[in-house]
Structures are given as structure tokens and as C-alpha cells.
Image (tube, rainbow, N blue to C red):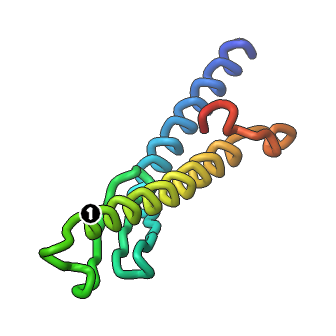
Amino acid sequence: MDSSNMNMADMFGKITQMQEKMQEAQKELENIVEEAEAGGGMVKVKANGKRQLVSIDLDKEVVDPEDTEMLEDLIVAGANKALQKAEKAGQDHIQKQYKDMLPENMKNMDLSQFGL
């Protein structure tokens, strides 16, 4: 086998390795959980790095059948905060995974401009 075939085989091997690492990083996003509060902690919402709500915890004092609009507002506020925090944590995680795969001279590159 000549050296150009070896370089191609090596390149394809590295691409496959990168794909496997990225699939693993995507799976790990489910384990990144961020919590946010609204209403002074009366509503607590958790979301994961895949931007999915994981849980909502309501203080019993905030549940007023006569004022469901306030509760709805607090849930929306808490969910939005948790999703924003989880999205940021997920982006940071994915960027770190990509940077670990980059050559040394490119590791300080801002990957956010590429949607990462």
C-alpha cells in the first residue's frame, strides 16, 4: 500500500473516531442538569442539556386555586431560566468535546461562530 492510501485510511479512521466521540457527547447532554428558580424559590425547574424539562417542584404555598395565572407565570419563568442555563451548559460541553479533537494550534478558536 502506498503512503497516500495509508493517509486516507488514517484520515477515515480519525473521522470515524470523531463521529463516535460526538455521538457520546450528545448522549451525555441528558446527564447535564441545570436548575432555576422563580418566585423566590417557590417554583424550581430542572432542565437537561438536550433542552428537555426534567422536573418542576412547586412549593405548596404557591398553589392557589383562585390564582392559577400567577402559578402559570412562575412556571413559565422558571422553565425559561432552566432551559437557558441547560442550553448554555450543553453548548459548553459540546464545544469542549470539539476543542479536544482539534489540532493544538486551533484549540483557542471560538466555535460559537459555527453554531457549536
- Taking the spot 28% from the left edge, 76% from the top edge, the residue there is 57
Residue 65 location in percent, x, y?
A: 13, 75
Q: Quadrant of residue 60?
A: bottom left
Q: Is residue 84 above or below residue 109?
A: below
Residue 97 location in percent, x, y?
A: 61, 48
- Taking the spot 43% from the left edge, 66% from the top edge, the residue there is 33
Foreground residue, 37 or 97?
37
38 lies left or right of 16: left
Q: Quadrant of residue 52?
A: bottom left
Q: Is residue 109 above or below residue 55?
A: above
Q: Is residue 111 above or below residue 10?
A: below
Q: Is residue 51 above or below residue 34?
A: above
Foreground residue, 11 or 24?
24
Residue lying at the far right of the rendered structure? 105
Q: Quadrant of the N terminus?
A: top right
Question: Does dot 1 land on a helix, a strand or a loop?
Answer: helix
Q: Quadrant of the C terminus?
A: top right
- Taking the spot 32% from the left edge, 62% from the top edge, the residue there is 73
Q: Please count the marks in the image.
A: 1
- Taking the spot 67% from the left edge, 38% from the top edge, the residue there is 112
67 lies left or right of 99: left
Residue lying at the far bottom of the rendered structure? 61
Residue 32 location in percent, x, y?
A: 46, 63
For label 1, the residue is: 72
Q: Alpha-carbon neighbours of circle 1 within 10 Å: few (<14), some, or many (≥20)?
A: few
Residue 104 location in percent, x, y?
A: 83, 43
Q: Quadrant of residue 14?
A: top right
Q: Amino acid at mark 1?
A: Glu
Residue lying at the far front of the rendered structure? 66
